[in-house]
Amino acid sequence: EWSDYKLTNNGSPYSGAVSPCNFLGRHSYSFVTLPGVGQAGGWLLESWAVNGRSHSGAFASLQELLELMNQWDATGDWTLDPLAQTIDGGGALTDYGPMRILHLGSGAAAVLEVNTSYQPNATSITLPAGTNELVLTRLSDGATDTLMLMVACVEPTYLESVIEIGQQDTICLELDELMGSWTEVRNACENPSSAAEFEIIPGTNCVRCLGVEEGFSSACLVICDEYGICDSTFVEVEVRAAQQNELQYDTLVTQLNRPVTADVLANDFLPRALTSFNIVREPLHGTLTVNPDYSLTYTPDPDYCNDGPDGEPEVVMYEACTAEGCQLALVFITVECGELVIYSGFSPNGDGVNDFFRIEGLGRYPDHKLCIFNRWGTRIFCTENYHNDWDGTWNGKTLPDDTYFYLLDLGNGQRLSGYLQINR
């Protein structure tokens, strides 16, 4: 109890606020509504999220479900309470989602929601800026403990910048409000706009900003020192069209697994002969080749595409130089995913033809998940972001020719299922 102790700060009794904090959770799932208890057929756990990571698998009893939960959540220490008809446990700081379960015998489905209760695990106090010497005395025996704390009150900085497309700006973060040597620089915010790109310059407290397209972009730049004190700088960048750029921007379109070649200089105005031509920014998901006539050939990575709901085009940059100087231009490359096509069978016999289970068009669904089961409901394969590379094996062993069941969660609320045939 707090009343059993006395706290002083810099020799004076502490008189500030005392509040509970660091609340820890205890989690529980009730299986009262679970369909098919006592019936044959088993169940399929379609999804269970632990700290945002989804898990799935087949089980034949509640004990098997418990074992799967403790396998996926190693520190959860989940236990079964048959009397209360609950599964209890979980990490105090772990986030859990609902369980979506399908009874394979009847086809009935249920959602087991997580019930969480929280209890405070610590006490918070408020301290002034500067050096604080805290002395905690236990009144029963006079035992003491001393803690030295340095408190820094840092004020965030707000910056606005205007740059042109292809132009770079360097932002160096202030150090005067930190109490020690800086150790880390990071961008704490995801930039929802692609107008500008931010790159931390290694070994410095500076960030490089590159204008990519017209619009506005923002960043939350955080710099921290050796004591863990951090200062934030919020940056708003407006990117405008270049006023005197003689190079025009190009847009290329190709299909899945197909290279594309384009004469990117055809729409540029170069008053004098070209003296040099260089790639300033390489693609992230493919290769770019400069041909002898200065045309560019882009070859996408295998099965990569970017025209899905969350996709963005590849952006590369080239530099063209004449006797009058050098200028930059961007090339935007769209790789079309095509329609979703699930092939109903394959023949993994090593002849190089149809050796893998293929699904075309998955690039449109970046959050998809694929699981495959045998005729007895045993999960034999499960993965996120499938790359058309399953060759009909399980735990390193070749599966027999047979009919199998697939479950494809597209990540947008839509699920597809069906059968596939392995026939060598």
Image (spheres, rainbow, N blue to C red):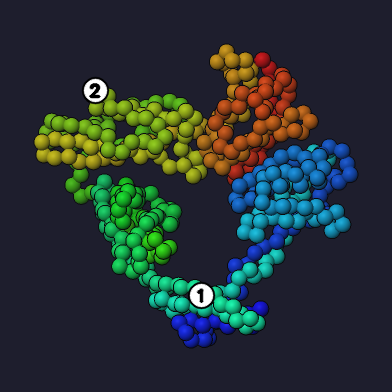
Q: Position of residue 114 (x, y in %)?
A: 71, 57
Q: CA distance from mark 2 to mark 1?
A: 73 Å
* Of pointers 2 and 1, the one earlier in the residue sequence: 1
Q: Secondary structure at mark 1?
A: strand
Q: Nearest the camera: 176 or 365?
A: 176
Tell me the kind of residue under disc 2: Pro
Crowding around mark 2 (Cα neighbors within 10 Å: few <14, some 14 to 19, many 20+) is: few
Compared to residue 14, the image places residue 68 above or below, namely above
Q: Residue at x 30, y 64 (%)?
A: 174
Compared to residue 343, the image places residue 123 above or below, namely below
* Quadrant of the frame with the C terminus: top right
Q: Position of residue 259 (x, y in %)?
A: 39, 26
Q: Residue at x 26, y 53 (%)?
A: 169
Q: Residue at x 67, y 66 (%)?
A: 118
The quadrant in which residue 405 appears is: top right
Q: Nearest the camera: 51 or 270?
A: 51
Contact between labelled residues 1 and 2, with CB atoms less than 8 Å apart? no
Q: Residue at x 60, y 70 (%)?
A: 122
Tell me the kind of residue under disc 1: Thr
Residue ID for mark 1: 146
Crowding around mark 1 (Cα neighbors within 10 Å: few <14, some 14 to 19, many 20+) is: few
